[in-house]
Image (tube, rainbow, N blue to C red):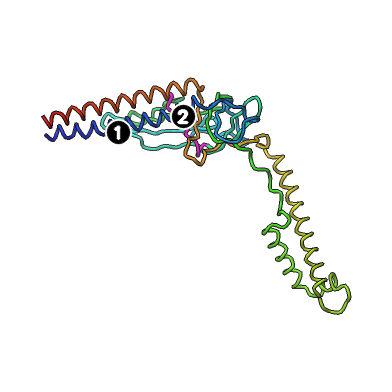
Amino acid sequence: MVDDLQVFVGALAIGASGYLMWRRNMRALALIEGTATSRVATAAKGYVELSGTARGAGEPPVRDPIQREACLWFKVVTERRRNNEWQVERRESSTQALALEDDSGSCLIIPGEAQIDEEQDPDAIIRDGSSRRHRIWRIRDGDPLYALGFLERRSPPLAGLAHGSVAAEHAVIELLRVWKRDQAKLHERFDANRDGHIDAAEWECARLAARAAVREQAETAAAQSRAEAAAAPDAHITHTLRQPDDGRPLLVSSRSEEQVARRVRRRSWLGLAMFAGGAVYILFALTRCTA
């Protein structure tokens, strides 16, 4: 009786896991097959499919912690053999941004936000004794890169404090407060009739002067920011690919669209088979119980 109950619970778990696997992969397959491939420079803002080449994003390459090979992204899964089974002991992956480049432009990808496809065979399996191993996946400069995600232009450098904005008015108030601490200089600049008092008209002149000073400071800072951005090593990267807010995934793979779709389709079939097998056994068990 106990064995039958364990088998029933196992069949229920397999069926539920299979159903979730089928749904998840069918959804991914619909996104892959239903999203037209776009070019970075001409794609409209929104969820897009891109295909290009993996490139660095201006930073030096990263190196995996096991073989110390240079790459753009790595993932290392360390496993230990216990009871004749390999069990995961540690996972480690890089977080440095990389870029997808096609013939029209480049977009930035943050690995921490992405589901990077490492279900293909690892680049290397390094043994550490008889009971420990490291499986290593890498994306290298020049590898093909396929991605699905939300594409948008990178934000330009800050243009400074906009005239009339809340932040600009706060800066003006703070500057006037500083000027009021030195009453002698304040009267020298703005007491036009030299009567020893700053009347309403003269105070308005001071306010206009403060606004002009704040605007000049903001424009200078914005020009410097634009110059620094133009000189940055990732200045040529015009777009960012991120996970959308509606729950759709940011998918990245170093395989082609056809290869990714084929793998996702196989996994959906496997999930459907697991669900069907579990459901058949559950129905058989329930029928036997009621007989």
* Marks 2 and 1, the one that precedes in the sequence: 1
- Name the residue: 50% across, 23% down: 255
Residue 16 image label: 1
Tag nearer the camera, 2 or 1: 1
Q: Position of residue 124 (x, y in %)?
A: 44, 25
Q: Position of residue 286 (x, y in %)?
A: 17, 31
- Rendered image quadrant of residue 131: top left
From the image, tell me which residue sits under label 2: 117
| Quarter of the picture holding the N terminus | top left
180 sits left or right of 259 in the view: right
- Mark 2 touching mark 1, by CB under 8 A? no
- Rendered image quadrant of residue 81: top left
> Which one is nearer the viewer's eye here, 133 or 202?
202
Above or below — where is 226 with respect to 184? Answer: above
Q: Tell me which segment is drawn in magenta.
A: 111-120
Above or below — where is 201 with respect to 47? Answer: below
> Which one is nearer the viewer's eye here, 233 or 239?
239
Amino acid at the residue labelled 2: Asp
- Name the residue: 57% across, 25% down: 37
Question: Residue 7 magenta-drawn?
Answer: no
**Which class describes the residues within 10 Å of circle 2: few (<14), some (14-19), or many (20+)?**
some
